Image (spheres, helix red, strand yellow):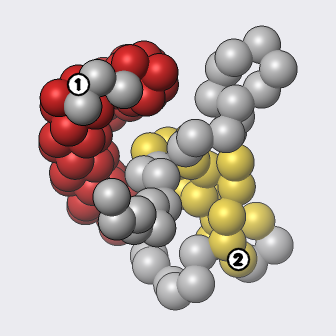
Amino acid sequence: MKKKIFHHPRLYLNIFLKDGEIFINYIDNNFSSNGKRLIQVSLLSHTISKNEYMEYLIYENRKQLQKLNNFLKTQKKVLEKYKKVRNYDKVKIIKNSMEILNEFKQEFHDWFKEHE
């Protein structure tokens, strides 16, 4: 099976200004030792005005949610293939991965309920 490089979707939480630079908080596939997603910070490579912060977050999170949905569809196809060839170890791994991704998808939906 051909492997693709996959960059895990990010759920962008908020944007803030610090020392004249714009930063964004997000969560992705990095977990702490207690199993919680780690909040990470990244410097935005372009400038946006403060009144566009929320619009930017909504736009970017929609793109990331679509990326997550596409990945879940791919995982479902892979799962069916492994079931067909009776590779049950891989089936278990893919199912666990899909559970985590579906939990992450719910975090996106919760974020949209709060911010739209």
Q: Is residue 12 visible?
A: no
Tell which residue pokes out farthest to the top in this image: 34
Say which amino acid is labelled 1: Lys
Residue, x 58% and y 84% (percent of image)?
A: 45
- Residue 16, image x, y percentages: 62, 58
Residue 70 left/right relative to 49: left
Residue, x 36% and y 26% (percent of image)?
A: 87
Q: Earlier in the sequence, mark 1 or mark 2?
A: 2
Disc 1, SS:
helix
Quadrant in which the C terminus is drawn? top left
* Gap between marks 1 and 2 measured at Cα: 49 Å
| Residues packed near mark 1 inside 10 Å, few (<14), some (14 to 19) or many (20 plus) | some
Residue, x 47% and y 52% (percent of image)?
A: 8
Indicate whether 111 appears above or below 70.
Answer: above
The residue that label 2 is drawn on is 21
Residue, x 67% and y 39% (percent of image)?
A: 30
Q: Quadrant of residue 75?
A: top left
Quadrant in which the N terminus is drawn? bottom left
Say which amino acid is labelled 2: Glu
Residue 111 left/right relative to 12: left
- Residue 69, image x, y percentages: 20, 44
The residue that label 1 is drawn on is 83
| Residues packed near mark 2 inside 10 Å, few (<14), some (14 to 19) or many (20 plus) | few
